[in-house]
Image (cartoon, rainbow, N blue to C red):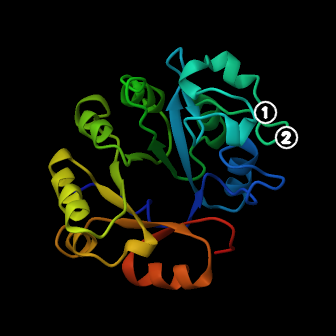
C-alpha cells in the first residue's frame, strides 16, 4: 500500500530551518525553526548522535564551523553539547526532543540522518524512539545507505527518503539499488536533475521528489519542472 505523503510536498521546506545564512539566525537552531513555523514552512534538519546516544540537531560531524570549538559531535555528551553556542549567538545545538517539543506538529518535519561510521550504530533506533508517539508529520532520510538499510527494521512506520546526487551511471545504479530498501521519497540535488533515476521514481513509481538546495529563482524554476517540492534557503518562496 502506497503511503499518503501529500503533506511532504504541500509546502516549501526550509533548509535547516528559516535561518538568514548564518548572519543573526543560524542554521539548525530553535530560532531558525521558530521562524519557519511562523512562516508556515516545513522544516528540514540534520541529526547526529552524541557520545551518550542522544540525537542532536547539528549538520557537521566537526564542531569548528558552527561553534568555534575543536572536536567531533560524537566525542561530546548531550549535556556538553547544550553548553556550546552556535555562531556566537545565544542558541545551543538543540536535541531532537527539544525540537519536537517546539514544533508540536504545527509544520511537517524532514530529518536527515547524518552518518558517522563507527559512531552511528544506534542513530536510526534513537531517532525512531524520539518520534514514537509524536503528533505531527515527520519523515527521515539519509545519504548514507548503511543507515537506510536499518530503517525498515528499526524505524518501522516512519516515511523514509533517499538523499542523493550524481548523474554518472555508477551513481544512478547505486540509487536504483536503494529502491529495494523501502524508500518512500527522494531528495535530490537540483543541479543533477533531470536524470533517469528521478524520471523513473516520479513517472513509474509515483514517488515524491523534493529538490535541494534552492537558493535562487533559476533553481526554483528548474525545480518546478523536475521535482514536486523545494528545499530552500536564502530566498523567499
Can residue 9 be seen from the camera position used here?
A: yes
At numbered mark 1, what does the secondary structure look like: helix, strand or loop? loop
**Mark 1–mark 2 distance (CA, rounded to whole Å):** 6 Å
| Residue at (21% x, 47% y) in the render | 182
* Callout 1 touching callout 2 (CB < 8 Å): yes
Residue topped by disc 1: 85
Residue topped by disc 2: 89
- Horizontal side, residue 151 vs residue 7: left or right: left
| Residue at (79% x, 42% y) in the render | 87
**Residue 70 x/y as whole percent:** 68, 28
Q: Quadrant of the C terminus?
A: bottom right
Is residue 50 depicted above or below 111 in this figure? above
**Residue 202 x/y as whole percent:** 26, 72
Is residue 114 depicted above or below 190 in this figure? above
Which class describes the residues within 10 Å of circle 1: few (<14), some (14-19), or many (20+)? some
Q: Which one is nearer the viewer's eye here, 136 or 232?
A: 232
Which class describes the residues within 10 Å of circle 2: few (<14), some (14-19), or many (20+)? few
Amino acid at each position: 500500500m502506497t503511503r499518503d505523503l501529500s503533506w511532504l510536498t504541500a509546502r516549501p521546506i526550509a533548509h535547516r530551518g528559516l535561518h538568514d545564512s548564518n548572519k543573526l539566525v543560524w542554521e539548525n537552531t530553535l530560532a531558525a525553526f521558530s521562524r519557519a513555523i511562523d512562516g508556515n514552512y516545513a522544516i528540514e534538519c540534520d541529526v547526529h548522535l552524541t557520545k551518550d546516544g542522544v540525537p542532536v540537531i547539528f549538520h557537521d560531524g566537526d564542531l569548528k564551523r558552527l561553534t568555534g570549538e575543536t572536536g567531533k559531535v560524537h566525542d561530546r555528551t548531550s549535556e556538553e553539547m547544550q553548553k556550546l553556542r552556535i555562531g556566537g549567538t545565544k542558541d545551543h545545538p538543540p536535541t531532537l526532543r527539544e525540537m519536537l517539543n517546539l514544533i508540536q506538529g504545527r509544520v511537517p518535519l524532514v530529518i536527515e540522518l547524518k552518518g558517522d561510521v563507527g559512531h552511528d550504530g544506534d542513530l536510526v533506533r534513537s531517532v525512531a524512539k524520539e518520534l514514537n508517539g509524536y503528533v505531527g508529520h515527520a519523515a527521515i532520510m539519509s545519504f548514507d545507505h548503511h543507515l537506510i538499510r536499518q530503517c525498515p527494521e528499526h524505524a518501522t512506520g516512519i516515511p523514509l527518503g533517499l538523499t542523493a546526487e550524481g548523474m554518472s551511471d555508477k551513481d544512478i545504479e547505486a540509487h536504483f539499488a536503494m529502491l529495494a530498501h523501502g524508500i518512500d521519497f527522494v531528495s535530490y540535488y537540483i543541479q543533477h536533475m533531470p536524470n533517469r533515476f528521478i524520471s523513473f521514481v516520479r513517472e513509474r513509481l509515483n514517488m515524491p521528489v523534493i529538490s535541494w538546495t534552492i537558493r535562487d529563482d533559476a533553481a526554483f524554476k528548474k525545480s518546478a519542472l523536475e521535482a514536486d517540492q523545494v528545499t530552500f534557503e536564502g530566498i523567499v518562496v
